């Protein structure tokens, strides 16, 4: 039994699910490598924990449902991709149980509870991320600074120790790992900028913080660039539709450009928004999910534009510094309605007006 994912009703170019998932996993590898280079082993460890958990949970659920060809469904790549996306989004030094709880929720509740692949209304990785963020805000906001800014060596052994015991081998805590040379607790560039502007500092004054580096956001800019390259590969391979990421990035560009033009002292530039947080990951790997996203061409454009607007509003006025996950879930909710009003007309059928005229 083969599983297929394709947009309907007029796109007949279908790819076997396993092949599509493998291609997406390959495309996400440059971003994972960039994360490892700038932030160490943490995200890779969480990815491995999440993969192990989702495979175990998926096997249990499929067995309880008496599904046939469990092995093929188990390794079709969908669960593994969900685990990878979740592991990418977690703070690198979050405790081990965070990735396990998130993985269980993503597969058992968000995916299998609704009937499995193709039936889930929400993106499993983003739904799990939001659940974790709301349930465990302390652990989910314990972002470490880039390795170049850390005063404590965080090698593989120390990273494993922190994730499983909350302390390094030398006894340093997570809070101490997040403390810079001058004694200040480090945060992500988005969080730092949001906090500083809320305290009355200008964007330019905030950018003097070492977490921004020489350009926009130390480490994060190259991670986003890596995901951007992977996304372009997916578009070139026709694995994803180009309308959604283009519309998303254009929408975020318009919002940030207008705000920056009006008040550059309190609004970040477009490049900062594009190269910070999970922007490119969301644009190319999350919003383009063929199950939870829009299927019509116009629908993809609308969903992308809506997501870009929501991300900007949440980053600027919301209580969370990024907003990608929340924007994705809101767009997942709106996608069926958007598709209903933007789906292509079916040939051979008359509209109600023309039917009335014919009578």
Image (tube, rainbow, N blue to C red):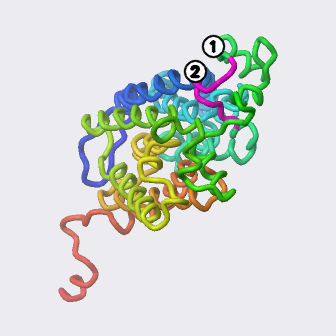
Name the N-terminal-most of marks 2 and 1: 2
Residue pictured at 33% horizontal, 51% vertical: 246
Q: Which of 211/224 is in front?
A: 211
Range drawn in magenta: 142-152
Q: Position of residue 88 (x, y in %)?
A: 54, 32
Pick the residue in front: 96 or 193: 193
Q: Is residue 196 above or below residue 40?
A: below
- Do residues under tags 2 and 1 come within 8 Å of each other at their CB atoms? yes
Residue 40 - label: 2
The answer to whether 277 appears left or right of 16 in the picture is right
Mark 1, residue position: 155
Q: Could you say whether the residue bearing mark 1 is in a helix, strand or loop?
A: loop
Q: Which residue does the image show at 24% across and 42% down from the upper left? A: 13
Quadrant of the rendered structure where residue 182 is?
top right
- Is 150 a magenta residue? yes
Q: Is residue 341 visible?
A: yes
Q: Residue at 66% across / 51% down in the picture?
A: 195
Label 2 element class:
loop
Where does the C terminus fall, quadrant-wise? Answer: bottom left
């Amino acid at each position: 039994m083969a599983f297929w994912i394709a947009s309907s009703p007029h796109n007949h170019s279908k790819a076997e699910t396993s092949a599509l998932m493998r291609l997406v996993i390959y495309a996400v590898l440059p971003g994972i490598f960039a994360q490892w280079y700038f932030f160490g082993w943490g995200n890779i460890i969480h990815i491995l924990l999440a993969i192990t958990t989702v495979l175990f949970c998926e096997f249990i659920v499929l067995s309880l449902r008496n599904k046939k060809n469990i092995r093929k469904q188990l390794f079709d790549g969908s669960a593994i991709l969900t685990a990878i996306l979740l592991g990418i989004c977690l703070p690198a030094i979050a405790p081990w149980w965070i990735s396990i709880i998130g993985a269980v929720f993503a597969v058992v509740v968000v995916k299998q509870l609704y009937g499995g692949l193709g039936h889930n209304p929400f993106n499993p990785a983003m739904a799990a991320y939001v659940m974790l963020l709301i349930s465990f805000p302390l652990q989910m906001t314990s972002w470490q600074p880039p390795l170049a800014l850390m005063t404590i060596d965080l090698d593989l052994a120390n990273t494993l120790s922190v994730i499983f015991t909350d302390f390094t081998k030398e006894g340093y805590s997570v809070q101490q790992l997040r403390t810079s040379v001058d004694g200040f607790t480090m945060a992500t560039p988005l969080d730092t900028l949001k906090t500083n502007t809320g305290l009355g500092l200008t964007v330019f004054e905030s950018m003097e913080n070492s977490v921004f580096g020489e350009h926009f956001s130390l480490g994060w800019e190259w991670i986003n660039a890596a995901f951007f390259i992977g996304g372009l590969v997916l578009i070139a391979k026709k694995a994803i539709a180009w309308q959604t990421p283009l519309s998303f990035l254009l929408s975020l560009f318009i919002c940030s450009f207008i705000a920056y033009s009006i008040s550059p002292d309190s609004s970040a530039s477009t490049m900062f928004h594009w190269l910070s947080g999970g922007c490119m990951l969301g644009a190319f790997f999350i919003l383009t999910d063929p199950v939870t996203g829009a299927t019509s061409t116009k629908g993809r454009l609308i969903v992308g534009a809506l997501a870009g607007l929501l991300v900007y509003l949440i980053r600027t006025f919301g209580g969370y510094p990024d907003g990608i996950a929340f924007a994705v879930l809101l767009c997942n909710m709106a996608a069926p309605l958007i598709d209903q009003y933007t789906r292509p007309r079916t040939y051979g059928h008359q509209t109600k007006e023309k039917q009335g005229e014919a009578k």
